[in-house]
Image: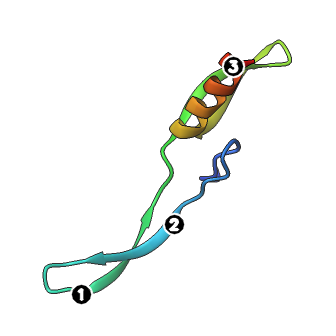
Amino acid sequence: MSRICPVTGKHPISGNRRSHSLIATRRRWDVNLQTYTIEINGKKTKVRMSARGYRTLNKTLKSN
């Protein structure tokens, strides 16, 4: 299953883990994906999206 948010397009980023002696080893920051049940065209559907994407989606739906 991909680790990409369908709403915001966020995806994992990579970088270095730094120890006390500054040795660099690769690591990865994953997206905060959660499973939400939302209505799409009147049907309830489970969608995996980031927590930030869910907040953005609710914000735009409340304003309309």
For residue 28, which quarter of the picture? Answer: bottom left
Q: Label 1 crowding class (10 Å Cα cut-off): few <14, some 14-19, many 20+? A: few
Regarding mark 2 in the picture, which secondary structure is present there?
strand
Q: Is residue 28 above or below residue 39?
A: below
Q: Residue at x 51, y 51 (%)?
A: 31
Pointer 1 or 2: first along the chain: 2
For the residues labelled 1 and 2, the Cα–Cα distance comes to 19 Å
How many numbered marks appear? 3
Q: Which residue is mark 1?
A: 23
- Sooner in the amino-acid sequence: mark 1 or mark 3: 1
Q: Where is residue 60 shown, x and y percent of the image?
A: 69, 26
Residue type, mark 3 in image: Ser
Side of 63 relative to 24 (left or right): right
Residue 9 pos. (x, y %): 67, 52
Local packing at callout 2 (Cα closer than 10 Å; few below 14, some 14-19, many 20+) is few
Q: CA distance from mark 1 to mark 3?
A: 49 Å
Of residues 11 and 57, the one drawn nearer to the viewer in this rendering: 57
Please tell me whether mark 3 sits on a helix, a strand or a loop: helix
How far apart marks 3 and 2 lie (CA) works out to: 32 Å
Quarter that holds the C terminus: top right
Q: For the residues carrying marks 3 and 2, which lies nearer the camera in this image?
A: 3
Residue at image point 51% right, 36% down: 51
- Choose top left, top right, bottom left or bottom right for residue 48: top right
Label 2 sits on residue? 13
Question: What amino acid type should be assigned to the residue bearing mark 2?
Answer: Ile
Is 3 left, or right, of 40 in this rendering? left
- Judged from the image, the secondary structure of the residue bearing numbered disc 1 is loop
**Image coloring type:** rainbow
